Every structure is written in C-alpha cells, then in structure tokens.
Image (cartoon, rainbow, N blue to C red):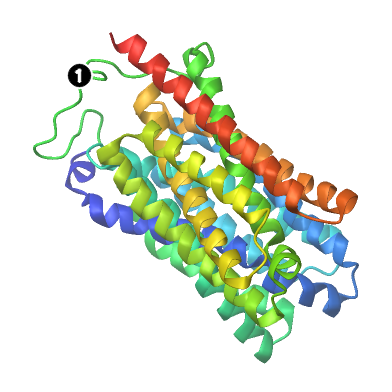
Amino acid sequence: MEKKKQKNRWLVLFCICCNTFCFGGVYAWSAFSGELASYMGWDYGQVTLAYSIMLMVIAAMGLVGGVLLQKFGARKLMIVAGIMWGLGWFITGFATNIFMLYISFGILAGCASGFGYNPGVVTAVSWFPDRKGFASGMAVGVCGMASLIVAPLANFLLTKFNVLTAFRLVGGFFLLISVATSWYIDGPEPGWKPEGYKTPASVAGSEGKTWREMLRDPRCYLLWGTLLCASVAGLMLIGHASKIGQEVAGITAAQAALLVGIMAVANFAGRLVLGSLSDVLGRHQIVIGVMLLCALDMVFLSRVTGFGGFVAAIVIAGVCFGGTLAVFSALSSDTFGPKYNGINYSIIFTGYGIASIVGPNVATAIQTSSGSYSGAFLFAAVCSILAAVLCMTALTMNKKMST
C-alpha cells in the first residue's frame, strides 16, 4: 500500500497517455483498409465492417471496463487491455478470411479499447483532483494525435512490406509500448490528495453516487444526452472529411491527407486547452460555450465554398469536438463524485457510442437523398444547440441542489 502513495502522479499520467496513444491508433485504420481489401481480394465494404464492429464493441465493453476498474483496479485492467490491443492488431496480420478479421480487429481490439480507454482517462482524473480538466485533456488529447504518427508509420511500412506484415509490426509496436508503461499505472490510495489541495465543500464528506444512484438522478440523462448531441458534428466530419472536402471545396487527395493532420492537431489543441480552461471557467460553461460555437460553425460550413473557409470550419469543429470529450470525464466526476466514476462515466459515454452511429449515417442518408451535405451540417447545428440546452439544464439543477 505504501508503494501507491509513493507513485509520481506525473509519471502515472505519462504512462496513461502512452496507452491512450496506442488506442488512438484506430484513427489510422483508413491507411490499412483499402490496402487490405486489395491485397486479400475482399470487398471493401466487408473490410470496413470490421471498423464498425470495433466501434460497437468499444461502446458495449466500455461499460464492462468501468465495472472491472472498480473491481480489479487500474493496474491489472490496463495491463490486460494493452496486451489485448497489441495482440488484436498483431493477429489481424494473420487473418486469412474476413471472419478472422472481424474477430481479431473488430472484437479483440474493440474489447481492449473498451477496457482500457475510459478507465485510463478516469484514472488520470483521479490523480489530479486539482486539475481534472488538464489530466483528462492530456489523456484523450494524445489519443486524438495518434493518427499523426501511426498513419505515416503505416504508409511507410506499406511501401516496404505487405499489409499483413504491416499489421503485425504495428501490433508489435503497440504491444511494446503497453508492456513498458502499463505496469506503473494505478489509482491513488483512498483519501489521497495532492499537497495543498482542499476538497471542495460540495463533495467533502461524500463518497459519491454509485451507478444505481446515478441512474436515479436526472442529471445523468441530461449529461448522457449532452454528450450524444455534442459528438454528432465531430463524428460526422471524421467519418466523411474527404468526401465533404471534395464536395465543398474541391480538395485533391493530397489536400485530403493534409486535412486529416489538420483535424488531428485541432482535436488535440481543443482537448488540452479547453480541458485545462474548464479547471478555471467551469465544465458546464465550457461545454455550453463550445456547443454554441459549434452550431454557428456548422451553419457556416453549410454555406462555405472556398478551401480556406472550409479548413477554418474544420479547425473550429475539431477544437469543439476535442474540447467536449476532454471535459466529460471530469464533469462526470464533479457531478457524481470520483469514487465510482469508472462505471458512472462509462455509462454516460454510451451516448458517444450512439453518436458514432447516428452522425456518419445521418450524413450519408442526407447526402444520398439531397445530393449535398448542407442538410447534414444543419442537422449537426441543431444537435449542438440541443447539447448546449441540455448542459445548461444540468448546470441549473446543480445550482439548485447545492443551495
């Protein structure tokens, strides 16, 4: 027990960031998918289904990960999750049929991300009660930045090896990082707090709400709805960035590749900067302001025609999306207490899982029916406004309950 007290919280955060970086490697999937379909002679739609399976598994296993974090602690869970993640990619390099791809990449790697991502972020927040937004922003920020390193690495490997070998090498890379860092990750001792930190009066003397108690609190559903609606715009753009760019601004393939990097940087900046600002300005206030800005940005995007305006709109959307994700684990901890935040945040995070289905599919449906993404942007604007209203309602309830 003494070893836990001696852990350096900054080193713990670094190790967590190393692992969430690995989980963020999934954003480089597009670098592999087309090459995999071509090399194996598989239908491209069948290959991309593996990614959809992974997203669904991540959403479902996120709940399980929250329960396992509560039962076994962060260290054991992160070690297992990291090993599973590396093996998922590595075994994909031996996939000889499409169903093996679904099992190795869709299910095994999906379970690993579900077990490790949210618990990692929650553990980071638990070490920084004085800087929750910053810790959350760092943990989720490096995840968003992973594509800037993994995608070029994948492209380099694909020029030297076949796609199956590239999967094995990337899987080995992830496995090495997780084994080297996850052993140090653990949660703080019960009652631990950094030197000089005073627990706010609103949470002092309270262990927080269990998931059953949280589900009886209307703020749970307000925050769940907020995260769902707030994620639609960002996930819509991530899923269709290249096609949207071609329609709106007539971008080339080279510009589309540059756009991915621009979005990743904007996403990271939003996660770190807005996460840190939430420590000063308040979580609800950041989400409300960001969602109103996002709504205006979506309306602008529905009318923009030039490349410069399109890039500016994408940057704003990336900052808003990243900042919202950075704030939510801390917001859950603030609202329902830190002790059970592993499972509580995992429940709220299912809203993101639903948004990952709603956003891209609604965009596809509207573009197919109308021949333009403009209607999809207006839909995203409405969702963003609704997110701001729901978050404002949750803030009002908080104030009433604290008086």
342 sits left or right of 24 in the view: left
The answer to whether residue 59 is visible is: no
Which quarter of the figure is the N terminus placed in? Answer: top left
Q: Nearer the viewer, residue 376 or 141?
A: 376
The residue sitting at 54% across, 16% down in the picture is 215
Vertical relation: 210 (above or below) 310? above
Residue on which disc 1 sits: 201
The answer to which image quadrant residue 42 occupies is: bottom right
**Residue 11 appears at what percent x and percent y?**
26, 57
The residue sitting at 56% across, 64% down in the picture is 25
Q: Nearer the viewer, residue 99 or 336?
A: 336
Question: Mark 1 belongs to which amino acid?
Answer: Ala
**Residue 223 appears at what percent x and percent y?**
51, 27
**Residue 238 appears at what percent x and percent y?**
64, 58
The answer to which image quadrant residue 26 occupies is: bottom right
49 sits left or right of 314 in the view: right
Residue count near mark 1 (Cα–Cα under 10 Å), binned few <14, some 14–19, many ≥20: few
Which quarter of the figure is the C terminus placed in? Answer: top left
The answer to whether residue 255 is visible is: yes
The answer to which image quadrant residue 232 occupies is: top right
Q: How many numbered marks appear?
A: 1
The residue sitting at 42% across, 54% down in the picture is 270
**Residue 358 appears at what percent x and percent y?**
73, 41
Q: Nearer the viewer, residue 287 or 180?
A: 287
Identify the secondary structure beneath mark 1: loop
Vertical relation: 218 (above or below) 243? above
344 sits left or right of 280 in the view: right
Q: Nearer the viewer, residue 339 or 398?
A: 398
